[in-house]
Amino acid sequence: MTSAAPGVPPAASAKPARAGSDLASSDLASPYLAGPGNFGTALLPPADSPLAVARRLASRIVTLCWVELRKIRHDRTELYTRAIQPALWLLIYGEVFTKIHAIPTPGHIPYLAYLAPGILAQSALFIAIFYGIQIIWERDAGVLTKLMVTPTPRAALISGKAFAAGVRSVVQATVVVILSAILGVTLTGNPLKLLGAAAVVVLGSAFFSCLSMSIAGLALSRDRLMGIGQAITMPLFFSSSAIPGGDHAGLAAGDQQVQPAVVRSRRAARPADRDAVSYWP
Amino acid sequence: MSELHDGAVATATAPSSGRGGAVVCSGLTYSFGAHIAVDHADLRIERGETFGLLGPNGAGKTTTIRMLTTLLRPMEGSVSVFGVDAVQRPMQVRRMIGYVPQLLSADATLTGRENVELFARLFDVPRRLRQERVESALAAMGMTEPADRLVKTYSGGMIRRLELAQALVNSPSLLVLDEPTVGLDPIARTDVWEFIAGLRETADVTVLMTTHYMDEADTYCDRIALMHAGSIRATGTPGLLKATLGQGATLDEVFRHYTGGTLDDDADKGGIRDVRRARRTARRLG
């Protein structure tokens, strides 16, 4: 960025760095001494140019993802506690139903391998839905107000949060993938496929967090949104590969040879499920 | 000032450089449904002064601040910050403002330094200057030592000082403080004010604040405006406003005089909400 960067008067950039806390106040003062006159329109970039808008959007997304990573680094409790539910699904539900062969799966694929991608998607979905609840909390706590007074367009704020949800989901998905590997699910070794799966987790989480934040804008209360969130996640979970019931199981299990195109299209529709934990021999 | 009800009150005693004012509001109006929160308010804040906006709960102070910080779009009238129209060019106005909201709202799950860096990034402070700016802002508020601790371990006064550091990292020309000392104990209040006063000595920054504490307004504000029922009732230096009521009058008496002594009547407008907010803040701080 140049010295004419927004919000930074030229005096600030021209000032050499000085050490020592006693000098800090005067360091801080230097930009002010330049005065508000420096905020003349000539120094500001054309705020509405597509390049400026795209740069600002990218910068906010990076910033909010950075915040998310710092939060995960400081407190991993949420990472661990959020791993309990997928672990229980895989360990109890997955193991038991794999052993008793109660749920039909395509070919000779163990049910656990069939279940794992669904659990991965479920983890990402729960995190994404949580973002709507979080933004209501931020609104109540005044955090959102403070963010909105920064030169951050509303759309950039939401996009940043959506991708932050994606980052957190990828971290959580990694935990699920590791857990699946430990339980004996055959994983693909293709890094491109894994990267593709990560990209789909990010985009999927971004989509659902946007949905959740949009609903949050209407619900305006955490209690209400929690109910709505549950109403969204439950049917989605049952339509995922975790529960291969109804036409889903029939489509995938019985007709694999007969309708390869349909199966392939389903694979394409849910690449996160299929690519992250590949059970194809 | 057209809203000046008392002719004896002086209007402009602040250092004025002859250029336009720092904040100029004209005929500012905003209503929530049938309730008119701000009713044709006129306000002029000069560059470099500390200006206090006083008034009972529900007087329209926060709504006014929300309009000039571009959070609300005025329904009528205009507001400009250093000559820039807040409605036409909100992004440009935001770059000039450092805002500290009423609630203690630093991110408790980040460290103090990260909180300030977040705002440096959101204000597009260039990467090469970012670290220096963050350190300077932290040092100016005496927050260097605890900067690497998580904010959830801070006291209320420390969080408020951290929020001031967040607001300063952009080197704002206008610092907007919405009840900066609400919910703080007397020692923390004095502490916060000493840092704000120290900042004024070293920097050419205009400060706009709202407060309920008359002693704070009396001590730290160059000029004050008394707001009631959405309109500005009087503007002037604390000394002149007191003088209009006679010798020995206190700012409390001036406040009651201009707000009609109807503080209790206004309790239903903002009282419950304020109590809820205060309780929420208390819970968050443990």
Image (cartoon, rainbow, N blue to C red):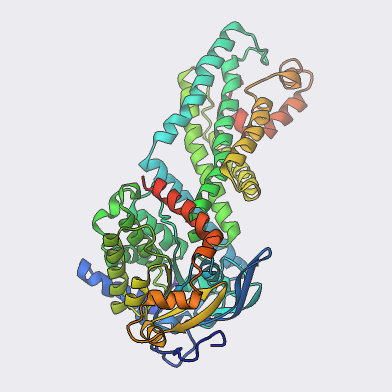
Q: Residue at x 45, y 73 (%)?
A: B54
B215 and A87: which is toward the camera: B215
Residue B211 rendering spot, x and y as whole percentages? 41, 68
Q: Quarter holding the C terminus of chain B?
A: top left
Q: Is B208 displayed left or right of B25 in the figure?
A: left
Residue B35 rendering spot, x and y as whole percentages? 64, 65
Q: Is residue A205 above or below residue A39?
A: above
**Numbered-mark total:** 0
Residue B118 rendering spot, x and y as whole percentages? 42, 57
Q: Is B264 displayed left or right of A76 in the figure?
A: right
In the displayed image of the protein, which residue is found farthest to the top? A100
Q: Is B11 displayed left or right of B40 in the figure?
A: left
Q: Quadrant of residue A101?
A: top right
Q: Is residue B208 above or below residue A119?
A: below
Q: Residue at x 75, y 17 (%)?
A: A250
In the displayed image of the protein, which residue is found farthest to the bottom? B18
Q: Residue at x 65, y 12 (%)?
A: A103
Q: Can residue A19 be seen?
A: yes
Q: Is residue A258 above or below residue A49?
A: above
Q: Is B87 displayed left or right of B174 in the figure?
A: right
Residue A159 rendering spot, x and y as whole percentages? 58, 52
A120 and B41: which is toward the camera: B41
Q: Quadrant of residue B75?
A: bottom right
Q: Can residue B141 be seen?
A: no
Q: Residue at x 66, y 33 (%)?
A: A231
